[in-house]
Amino acid sequence: MSWSEQVLTELSAEGHRLTGPRRQILEYILRYTAPFTAEELLADLHQTEVQVGRATVYRTLELLQQHEWLRLVHRPEGEHGYVVGEPGHQHHLVCRACGKVTMFEGCELETLLGGLAERLHFRIESHWLEALGVCRSCQVAGS
Amino acid sequence: MSWSEQVLTELSAEGHRLTGPRRQILEYILRYTAPFTAEELLADLHQTEVQVGRATVYRTLELLQQHEWLRLVHRPEGEHGYVVGEPGHQHHLVCRACGKVTMFEGCELETLLGGLAERLHFRIESHWLEALGVCRSCQVAGS
DNA sequence: TCTCCCAGTGATATACTGTATCGTCTAGCT
DNA sequence: AGCTAGACGATACAGTATATCACTGGGAGA
């Protein structure tokens, strides 16, 4: 079962409609290897025969993000982009050179934050961790 | 030596001018206990007798952030705000209730990321960690 | 299979946040 | 006091996102 099929199944199960634009956006998203913004996706779609409205793109991305099928990433330049991801808590390593995103589970981070929370009497509800650097292949290419 | 005096001294040492608007913005910033955005500061200043231009506010905040006298914080709603802070690498605990920001040094985090980088052959250059929750006093107030 | 209803669509307008421009002013050096 | 470049501020502009609203088509129920 592919990513888009899984998403469609889950959306349908929750009572959302599986419309043409949604299917097309889902298919198109898979082409991206690096984070993309709503505007980029919109422009790219308009390059093809697919013509969807701006509002629909924003709404669909929002919907997918809420269901954790897409993840928000802060890109170096400051805008925020989306990446395809499995549901569950994850963190990102963003490559400054190629833009590719590597995900990892930050299990030890939980312990770190737990200790900190106890020390400061702060109840932590959620956290955000993102690292910026250069991925393996870009290091090789650069040297 | 107060915060604003320290900032003014450093700015002056670097060849920046100590203009009226800059002094006024510096003074006003100290009133905030929670992160504020450029637009908020601008609006607040316009409520008073102080009339500074939009561009000046943005430029000054940018300048202060570059010198690490102000720190960028991602607020729950998505906008980014500024908080007064000492120079040096720090992370934030943001209170969902009162908006107050507690800073901490994430020394152990460096080790965590170091191990991760080695495992994934990813060269980490910078990182961003921010936690959202409820601070001690808001927990007390809420219960 | 047909019908109907409302979630979803898309064109457009609008809000918001931040940057660029450019003539004017002033901090601070000489 | 005079000079000059850094800073100011009014305005225009760019980019990102949301609001509105008439319409369309997905899909459940007949």
Image (spheres, coloured by chain):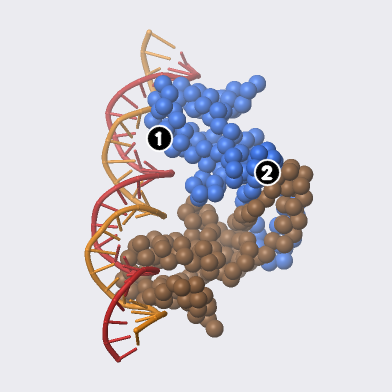
Chain colours: A brown, B blue, C red, D orange
Q: Residue at x 69, y 40 (%)?
A: B140
Toward the viewer: A15 or B117? A15
Amino acid marked by disc 1:
Ala
Looking at the image, which is closer to me, B128 or B32? B32
Kind of residue at disc 2: Ser
How packed mark 1 is, by other alpha carbons closer than 10 Å (few <14, some 14-19, many 20 or more), is few
Q: Chain of mark 2?
A: B
State the image coordinates of residue B2 (x, y, percent, origin top left): 63, 23
B32 vs C11: above or below: above
Give the residue pinned by disc 1.
B55
First in sequence, mark 1 or 2: give its number. 1
Residue underneath mark 2: B143
Image quadrant holding the C terminus of chain A, namely bottom right
* C29 versus B141 height, above or below: above
Q: Is residue B17 visible?
A: no
Q: Give the camera-side residue of C10 and D30.
A: D30
Residue D18 percent location from the top left of the image: 39, 53
| Residue drawn at point x = 58 percent, y = 41 percent | B99
| Nearer the camera: disc 1 or disc 2 | 2
Q: Quadrant of residue A129?
A: bottom right
- Asked if residue A125 lies left or right of residue D19, the reply is right
Q: Is residue B86 above or below residue C27?
A: below
- Residue B138 horizontal side relative to residue A66, left or right: right
